[in-house]
C-alpha cells in the first residue's frame, strides 16, 4: 500500500509539473481571494480558522493564501556545545553523581544580516555555538552579547541567505491575536526543518515564572515543543511579536506546560539589543530584594493597604544597605513614580546609571520614610550573607549564641522546617554544601561543623555554585533529637532591584 501511495504521489507531481510548463504558474491569490479549503468561505488575512465553519487552516496554507511569504527560512537551529559537568542538587547530592551536559539545541532568528537573536539561557557555560539551516549547512557562531536579565542573546554568523525579520516594537500585541511560533524541534520530535505552531496571544504581562530577573512575558496557547526556545513568534504580517523562552537547567529545557507558553515581547528584545550594541555597560541597582504584597505578606510586615511592594531582603554592602533601607519597608514611590509593579520599577532602574541618586519613599512601622539611594553597578549574581540566606531560602532565623553556637531564634509557621519540627532553641550543628566545579573542588562535599557566622559564610561559597543554591542543614533539638533538611532553589534573582 505504501509503494502504491508513493507511486501515485509521484504521478501527481509529474502532472503538476507538466501543467506548469504548458500553462505557466498560477497567480498567487491576494488576501481578498483567500478562502476556506473546507467550505469555500472568504478568509481574513492571516486567519488560522474559518469564521463560517470553524475549520482549521494549516499554517503554511494560510500564509500562502493571504499572500504572506513563508517565514520559516528566517529561522535557524542553535547548537550549544558543552564539555563540563554540573554539580546540581539532584546530581551531586540525591544521586551522588554529576550531570553531564554535552549539547543543548534551540532556535534563533535573524534581526540583521549576519545577526541572530536567541534565548540566552541556552548558551550559559557553552564552549562553542553553531547555527544550522534546514539544508544541513552549519557554521560557527560568535557571541556578540548576552542580556541575562531579559533573557536575550545576540549571535553573529556568516549566513547571508537567511532572511531578516522585523521586530514589532511600535504596536503591542493584543489578547486573542493570532500568532505563529517557529523553530526547530528537538528530542523525540527532532526535525531537519523548522516547524510552525499556530496559536493566539492568551495573556500579556505574565510573570513571575522564576526564569530570569525581568519577567514581563506574552502568554500563548501555541504548542512549543522542545527546541523552539529562542525561536520567533510572528503576527499575521510576519513581524516578530516575541521570542519563545524557556527555563534552562543543565541539559533540561522546559518551555512551559500544555497550552501555556511564554515569550519575551519584541519591546524587551529591542531593549536588550540596544543595550548589547551600546557596549553592555553595567546596569544600576539599589541592592534590595522586593516582593509583591499579598494578604499573608501584608500581615507579616504590618503594611497599610496602599503598599504593593515590600523590601524582603537587603543585600550586604549594597546602596540600599548604606542608605538605611530595611527588611519590611513598604515601597511607595521611587524617584516620584509609584512602586506598584515590580517590572515597571525594574524598567525605570534600567534607564538609570550607576552613581545617580534616587529618592525612595517608603513606610516603616506606620511612619513615612524618605531615603536617598546612590545607585551602584549591579553584580552578576546578587548574594546574601549566611544568616540572611537561611532566612531567604529556608524561612528560618539563626542567631549566634555564646560565641561558638548557632541557635534557631524562629521558624516561619507553615514552612518545611516547621513541618519537620525544627524549633527555637535548636542548634545548627553542621551543613553540607555541593562540590564546586567552578572553583576546582571536584570531590563530593561532606558535612562540616559550623559554630560561627564565619563558618556558615565559608560553606555558602559552594552553595551558590552552578545554577542553583543548595545547602544541607543538621539540627540538634533541646531533647537531643537530630533533624536534617535540604534547602534548594534555582538561582533566578527575580525581585532584585
Image (tube, rainbow, N blue to C red):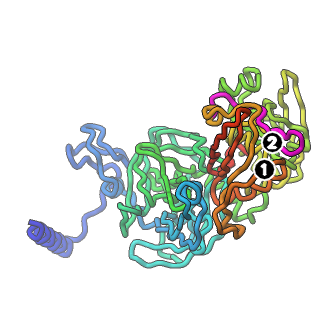
Give the residue at x 78% y 35%. Answer: 337
Image quadrant for the N terminus? Answer: bottom left
Q: Is residue 13 above or below residue 335?
A: below
Mark 1 element type? loop
The range drawn in magenta is: 399-415
Query: Which mark, residue 406?
Result: 2
Neighbor class of circle 1 (other Cα within 10 Å; few <14, some 14-19, many 20+) is many
Marked residue nearer the N-terminal end (2 or 1): 2
Q: Nearer the viewer, residue 121 or 361?
A: 121
Q: Give the residue furthest to the front.
A: 480
Q: Is residue 204 above or below residue 18?
A: above
Residue 102 image offset from top left, x and y in percent: 51, 70
Q: Quadrant of residue 398?
A: top right
Q: Quadrant of residue 408?
A: top right
Residue 216 image offset from top left, x and y in percent: 61, 44
Q: Quadrant of residue 460?
A: bottom right
Mark 2 element type? strand
Q: Is residue 327 magenta?
A: no
Neighbor class of circle 2 (other Cα within 10 Å; few <14, some 14-19, many 20+) is many
| Residue that badge 1 annotates | 450
- Measured in 3D between alpha carbons, the distance from the residue under mark 2 to the one under mark 1, in whole angstroms, is 8 Å
Residue 318 image offset from top left, x and y in percent: 85, 48
Residue 319 shown left or right of residue 442 in the figure: right
Check whether the beta carbons of the residues at disc 2 and disc 1 lie within 8 A of each other.
yes
Amino acid at each position: 500500500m505504501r509503494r502504491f501511495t508513493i507511486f501515485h504521489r509521484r504521478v501527481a507531481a509529474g502532472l503538476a509539473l507538466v501543467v506548469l510548463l504548458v500553462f505557466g504558474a498560477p497567480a498567487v491569490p491576494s488576501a481578498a481571494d483567500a478562502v476556506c479549503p473546507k467550505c469555500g468561505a472568504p478568509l481574513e488575512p492571516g486567519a488560522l480558522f474559518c469564521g463560517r465553519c470553524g475549520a482549521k487552516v494549516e499554517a503554511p496554507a494560510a500564509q500562502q493564501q493571504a499572500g504572506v511569504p513563508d517565514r520559516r527560512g528566517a529561522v535557524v537551529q542553535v547548537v550549544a556545545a558543552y564539555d563540563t559537568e554540573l554539580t546540581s542538587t539532584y546530581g551531586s547530592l540525591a544521586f551522588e553523581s554529576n550531570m553531564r551536559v554535552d549539547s543543548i539545541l534551540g532556535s534563533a532568528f535573524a534581526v540583521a544580516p549576519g545577526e541572530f537573536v536567541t534565548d540566552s539561557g541556552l548558551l550559559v557555560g557553552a564552549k562553542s555555538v553553531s547555527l544550522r539551516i534546514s539544508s544541513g549547512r552549519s557554521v560557527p557562531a560568535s557571541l556578540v552579547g548576552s542580556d541575562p536579565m531579559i533573557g536575550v542573546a545576540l549571535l553573529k554568523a556568516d549566513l547571508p541567505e537567511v532572511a531578516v525579520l522585523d521586530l514589532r516594537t511600535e504596536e503591542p500585541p493584543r489578547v486573542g491575536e493570532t500568532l505563529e511560533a517557529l523553530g526547530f524541534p528537538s528530542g523525540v520530535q527532532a526535525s531537519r526543518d523548522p516547524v510552525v505552531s499556530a496559536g493566539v496571544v492568551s495573556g500579556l504581562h505574565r510573570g513571575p515564572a522564576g526564569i530570569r530577573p525581568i519577567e514581563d512575558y506574552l502568554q500563548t496557547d501555541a504548542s512549543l515543543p522542545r527546541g523552539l526556545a529562542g525561536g520567533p513568534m510572528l503576527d499575521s504580517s510576519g513581524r516578530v511579536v516575541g521570542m519563545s523562552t524557556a527555563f534552562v537547567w543543565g541539559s533540561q529545557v522546559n518551555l512551559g506546560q500544555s497550552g501555556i507558553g511564554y515569550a519575551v515581547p519584541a519591546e524587551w528584545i529591542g531593549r536588550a539589543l540596544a543595550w548589547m550594541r551600546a557596549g553592555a555597560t553595567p546596569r544600576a541597582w539599589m541592592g534590595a530584594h522586593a516582593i509583591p504584597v499579598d494578604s499573608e505578606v501584608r500581615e507579616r510586615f504590618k503594611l497599610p493597604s496602599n503598599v504593593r511592594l515590600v523590601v524582603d531582603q537587603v543585600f550586604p554592602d549594597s546602596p540600599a544597605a548604606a542608605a538605611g533601607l530595611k527588611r519590611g519597608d513598604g515601597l511607595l514611590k521611587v524617584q516620584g513614580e509609584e512602586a506598584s509593579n515590580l517590572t515597571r520599577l525594574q524598567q525605570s532602574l534600567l534607564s538609570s546609571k550607576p552613581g545617580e541618586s534616587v529618592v525612595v519613599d517608603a513606610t516603616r512601622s506606620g511612619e513615612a520614610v524618605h531615603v536617598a539611594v546612590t545607585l551602584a553597578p549591579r553584580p552578576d549574581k546578587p548574594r546574601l550573607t549566611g544568616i540572611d540566606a537561611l532566612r531567604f531560602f529556608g524561612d528560618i532565623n539563626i542567631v549566634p549564641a555564646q560565641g561558638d553556637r548557632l541557635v534557631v531564634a524562629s521558624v516561619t509557621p507553615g514552612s518545611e522546617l516547621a513541618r519537620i519540627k525544627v524549633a527555637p532553641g535548636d542548634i545548627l550543628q553542621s551543613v553540607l554544601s555541593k562540590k564546586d566545579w567552578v572553583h576546582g573542588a571536584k570531590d563530593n562535599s561532606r558535612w562540616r561543623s559550623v559554630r560561627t557566622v564565619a563558618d556558615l559564610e565559608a560553606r555558602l561559597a559552594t552553595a551558590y555554585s552552578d545554577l542553583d543554591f543548595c545547602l544541607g542543614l543538621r539540627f540538634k533539638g533541646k531533647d537531643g533529637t537530630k533533624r536534617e533538611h535540604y534547602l534548594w532553589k534555582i538561582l533566578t534573582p527575580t525581585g532584585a532591584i
